[in-house]
Image: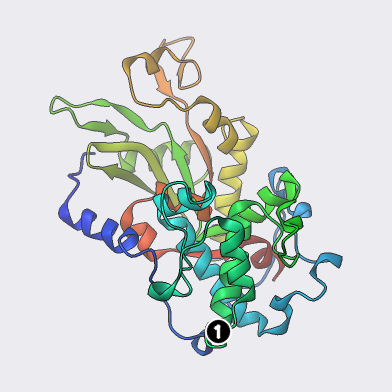
Amino acid sequence: MKRKYTKEDEKDEFAQHGHPNRLPFGSASDRGESWAGTSGPFDQGDEYRAFKYMKVGGGDNVGLKHLEVDQNALKAVFLQLAKLVNENASQRKNYLEEGKHGRLQCIACGRSSKDYEDMHGLIMHAYNSDSADLLLDHLGLHKALCVLMGWNYSKPPDSSKAYQFLSADEAIANQDDLIVWPPLVIIHNTITGKAKDGRMEGLGNKTMDNKIRDLGFGGGKSKSVYGKDGHLGITLVKFSGDQLGLKEAMQLAEFFEKENHGRNAWARVKPLTFSRDDEKNPNLMQVDEKTREKTRIFYGYLGTASDLDKVDPETRKKVTIKSRMEYLSK
């Protein structure tokens, strides 16, 4: 149930976060294949009806440069860049806060990038880049940054900044569409307390497997997430990278959402730090009326690109990003 935070973990963290300006893939001509999976759509729950808000085209995209390049190649680059702009937590925060914490640079240009005053300047550069060799990289970055910021990637950016206006429903739908692959559900509040050595302890993998099975979901495999101070109170439930695995992951996430224990609920109730007072918090603990036994209340949701900072370094390194809407439409 306890695991040391080793030097190998630190190496993985450095590998993921140490070089934010280095693209992890080759030339544009090497990336022509689609990342879509096996075919066969299945029914979706109420939680996922938000897909009707997806910004996928329409009148806004007239003259859009994205339509002038190979669509499969652009899609592959966009998904890789969606991972790259999200997996480094400090870089992602700097994007979202318009460069308040450091220089804004173009990761498509890499070391040759100049600095940009704000995200508008960076996005204008990405969309209007005149580098033929890096055209796909820049257009993919333009789209990835627009989705991150909640802006309209299907409207060409200009000085009016009209592309920055997108409804909250559309922005959230675009972000929720970018799922971690193979699919996983992130479960919070799995911490149990402090050990004598001061390290945090939490529910083990086998214990979580049993608890998930008790809820009626047996297809996933649990993995606890640890940091330097021990268990982080996060458990990943990983599913197979196929149609069935995605269906099972979505059903588990939908279960938490229907219980009002989904992503938004956790954002409202999560404590800043662990304390003994958590056991008195009805949002975190429930008491059996008969036995008076206290148990943790779990909160869970389907992992997306924006959650890459919550997973362990090994998982972050291995996963990719897929479009859930596209996968379900195959």
Classify 115 as above or below 69. Answer: above
Q: Is residue 23 visible?
A: no
Q: Is residue 140 left or right of residue 46?
A: left
Residue type (three-letter) at the residue carrying disc 1: Ser
Q: Residue at x 44, y 71 (%)?
A: 113
291 in relation to 154, above or below: above
Q: Position of residue 102 (x, y in %)?
A: 41, 52
Residue 226 is situated, as x and y percent measured from the top left of the image, at: 28, 43
Which x, y percent locates residue 196?
14, 24
The total of numbered circles placed on residues is: 1
Q: Residue sitting at 23 percent across and 54 percent down?
A: 9
Where, quadrant-wise, is the C terminus in this rendering? bottom right
Along the line of sight, which residue is nearer the eye, 175 or 110? 110
State the residue at coordinates (54%, 66%).
242
| Residue occupying the far left of the picture | 197
In the drawing, does residue 60 fall left or right of residue 243?
A: right
The residue identified by callout 1 is 131
Mark 1 is surrounded, within 10 Å at the Cα level, by few (under 14), some (14 to 19) or many (20 or more) other residues, namely few
Q: Residue at x 60, y 47 (%)?
A: 251
Is disc 1 placed on a helix, strand or loop?
loop
Q: Residue 328, image x and y in percent?
A: 68, 64
Which of the pair 45/157 is nearer the observer? Answer: 157
* Residue 64 found in image quarter: bottom right
Quadrant in the picture for the N terminus: top left
| Of the pair 229 and 171, the residue shown nearer to us | 171
The residue most toward the right is: 59
Query: Which color mode does the image show?
Result: rainbow
Residue 283 visible in the current orientation? yes
